Amino acid sequence: MSNLSAPHFHNEEAAYAYVEARIWPQGAVCPRCGTMDRIGKLGGKSTRVGTYKCYECRKPFTVKIGSIFEDSKVPMRLWLQAMYLIAGSKKGISSNQLHRILGVTLKTAWFMSHRICEAMRSNDMTPFGGNGGAVEVDETFIGQLKGVPKRRAFQHKMKVLALIDRDTRQARTMAIDDVNAKTLMPLVIANVAEEARVMTDEHSGYRDVKHIFAAHGTTSHGRGEYVNLEARSIHSNTVEGYFSIFKRGMKGIYQHCGEQHLHRYLAEYELRYNNRIGLGIGDTERSDRLLMGVVGKRLTNETASARA
Ligand SMILES: [Zn+2]
């Protein structure tokens, strides 16, 4: 039997039950008053699937409230299909592809993929390298900024910072405005523990790293050096590998990624990388982890204008 034949991908009742079991493991919770005690499930033929009533505030609710699904008319089973597809594809799925596979309009597909990306954003702020391990840090340039003329240097490109904890094999990425020390250092300090050994290239933006962290290893890419020959653990090849997957995916799939959407694409890649098969996490589990991220991330202005 194919994974896609599971009932929650086809039957609305089963889809709600699937989501509720994950978001409300102890049973339904009223999104307004937080009670779990005086809640009843509404049955009746004209009642919408997944409707509960809170007898404290006397109002009905569903598991969609307060999540990325709120205000959306898209059936839950299609949300689950979309999440499974997005979580399961290494390089991502474009809105166009989603539109064709799910049979929803392009506008709806665009709306769904952006909200799902929103759910992928991690809230974990635990510093990397807390056990004294190696953390690789690097920045890259991608695409083009609107309204900035093309130059030989990088000013006209979008900028991304990535950190990889080599022990836990987790990545953390963020869009940045500049690549100078003033921009980079506060982010490195916020995301890396003092006891970490930090690996970067020789970019001057990282010159203060050695004063703050346990060690600073550098390789000189300008001289064609990718692994420091005196100490082979000094390199930033892992983070560069990460960027190359990200860029390949962005090139093929999200040709027109505007700056305002970059953080979502970054979150999408990050979630897939941090929950990858190489760490023993399969497609269903990755999709379930994504589902856990749908709560509390419902609206941003630009998605609100494209309600579906
Ligand atoms: Zn209530």
Image (spheres, rainbow, N blue to C red):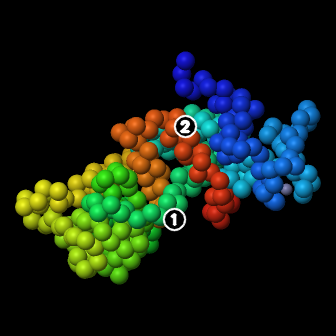
Camera-side residue: 227 or 268? 227
Residue 268 coordinates in the image, percent (x, y): 48, 51
Residue 112 coordinates in the image, percent (x, y): 61, 47
Q: Amino acid at mark 2?
A: Tyr
* Identity of the residue drawn at 36% across and 63% down: 130
Q: Quadrant of residue 3?
A: top right
Mark 2 lies on a secondary structure that is: helix
Camera-side residue: 204 or 156? 204
Q: Quadrant of the N terminus?
A: top right
Give the residue pinned by disc 2.
Answer: 84
* Identity of the residue drawn at 67% across and 46% down: 23
Residue with the most extreme left position: 230
Residue 101 coordinates in the image, percent (x, y): 57, 33
Residue 32 appears in the picture as rendered = yes
The residue carrying mark 2 has its beta carbon less than 8 Å from ligand 1: no
> Quick check: 266 above or below 11?
below
Query: Quick one: label 2, few (<14), some, or many (20+) residues within 10 Å?
Result: many
Residue 272 coordinates in the image, percent (x, y): 44, 46
Query: Quick one: label 1, few (<14), some, or many (20+) residues within 10 Å?
Result: few
Cα–Cα span, label 2 and label 1: 25 Å
Give the residue pinned by disc 1.
Answer: 260
> Quick check: 61 above or below 222?
above
Earlier-in-chain disc, 2 versus 1: 2
> Quick check: 252 above or below 103?
below
Asked whether, in this view, residue 84 is left or right of residue 56, the answer is left
Q: Quadrant of ligand 1?
A: bottom right
Q: Amino acid at mark 1?
A: Gln
Mark 1 lies on a secondary structure that is: helix
Residue with the most extreme top position: 1
* Identity of the residue drawn at 64% across and 31% down: 9
